[in-house]
Amino acid sequence: MRAQRGYVLRIAVLLIVAAVLVFVLIRGTKGGSLMFGLLSGTQTETVLDERFNLDGVENFTADILSLNVEVASTDEPEARVVLESNLPPEHRAELAVERDGASFSLEQLKRLRIGLFLGARETLTVYLPASYADALTLKLKSGNLRVPGARTLKSFALTLHSGNAEIGDVIAGTCAARASSGSLTLGRWIGNGEIHLTSGRLRMAALSGQRHSVKTSSGTVQIGEVAGEVDLRVTSGTVRVESLDGHGNISSSSGGLHIGVRRMSGNLNLRCTSGVIKAAVPSSSSFRFEGKVVSGGVKTDFPSAKEGGRVTATVGDAPEHTLRCETTSGTIRVAYL
């Protein structure tokens, strides 16, 4: 009898919980708007479309909390901000625009926090004049970012806490990107590069300039071309550079290095704590080679080098720079292109 009463009580509790959920879905927070946003929010409409004069603006900043953002170029002389949403009016994002002298800022004041909006879609499109060539700063707490095409700027800075970013070609004095979690897909960046990624993947077409700092804590790094002095450090992940024209330091604590060297303008150091180092150099190169493995072996295409755990060689005539490869546990393979 007790077991039967307990079973009936559990059924009653479940029915009450289900009734409460249905009531919340139907009534929502304001007369059924929540249910409308959940089930009928498939229609996206333009809720903001404004234009702004950027004459005299030297710094354009967008600080966004939870929107998908696209920064597109326009041949028009004014900037244009378009917000599209499928949410009820009382739950839509709120934006504030401020002009303070030479600074222009676009800020999201409110973010969506109601988890029942399963189909929420809010997109912000910023049409920036192609003639704008000063500083551009983009900050996103959560959401995806697209900046297609190519831009020439005084400086470019991106801060991304959670989400993915796709950035096209950028020519600037400084090109900076910081991401806490997500992936970065970047085009050809010309300028001093500063790219720091806590967790995620970095894919980049090219990075050229005088000095570059690329650091990731966890994730893979894949760059097509690198030119200049580079400091590239990965805590856990694989590094691939198709073509390097420069010098500097490339390291991975846990993971492999795959580096194609087109030309060395100074000493190049490749280091792994645990992993494989593979490097390819032109047959016409001239440099000193030093390879060291604690547990593993070194193999090269250099006639003067012997295989083993510690290898040195002189490659070409009158070498001016040194290629150092070192791994604690793994193998080193250096071959001609």
Image: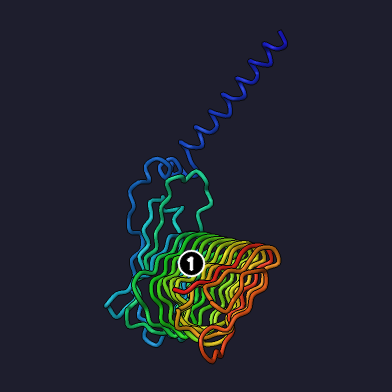
The percent coordinates of residue 141 (x first, y second) are: 53, 63
The amino acid marked with disc number 1 is Gln
Q: How many marks?
A: 1
* Observer able to see residue 108: no
- Taking the view exactly as shown, the residue that stands out farthest to the top is 1
Please name whichever residue, 208 or 90, is drawn nearer the observer in this view of the structure: 208
Q: Quadrant of residue 35?
A: top left
Determine whether, in the image, residue 70 is placed left or right of residue 178: left
Q: Residue furthest left?
A: 75
Residue 303, quarter of the rendered image = bottom right
The colouring scheme, among rainbow, by chain, secondary structure or one colour, is: rainbow
Q: Is residue 135 above or below residue 143?
A: below
Horizontally, residue 127 falls left or right of residue 138, namely left
The residue identified by callout 1 is: 222
The extreme right residue here reads 2
Say whether residue 325 is visible.
yes
Image-quadrant location for residue 269: bottom right
Q: Is residue 308 above or below residue 102?
A: above
Return the x and y of residue 290 as percentages of the image width and height.
63, 78
Q: Residues within 10 Å of mark 1 (few under 14, many from 20)?
A: some
The structure residue drawn at horizontal position 32% and vertical position 55%, both measured from the top left corner, is 45
Q: For the point 45% across and 79% down, which residue is it? A: 283
Element type where label 1 sits in the image? strand
Q: Position of residue 315 (x, y in %)?
A: 54, 83
- Residue 7 location, x and y as percent? 65, 16
Above or below for 329 versus 52: above
| Front-most of residues 208 and 169 | 208
Name the foreground residue: 299 vs 105.
299
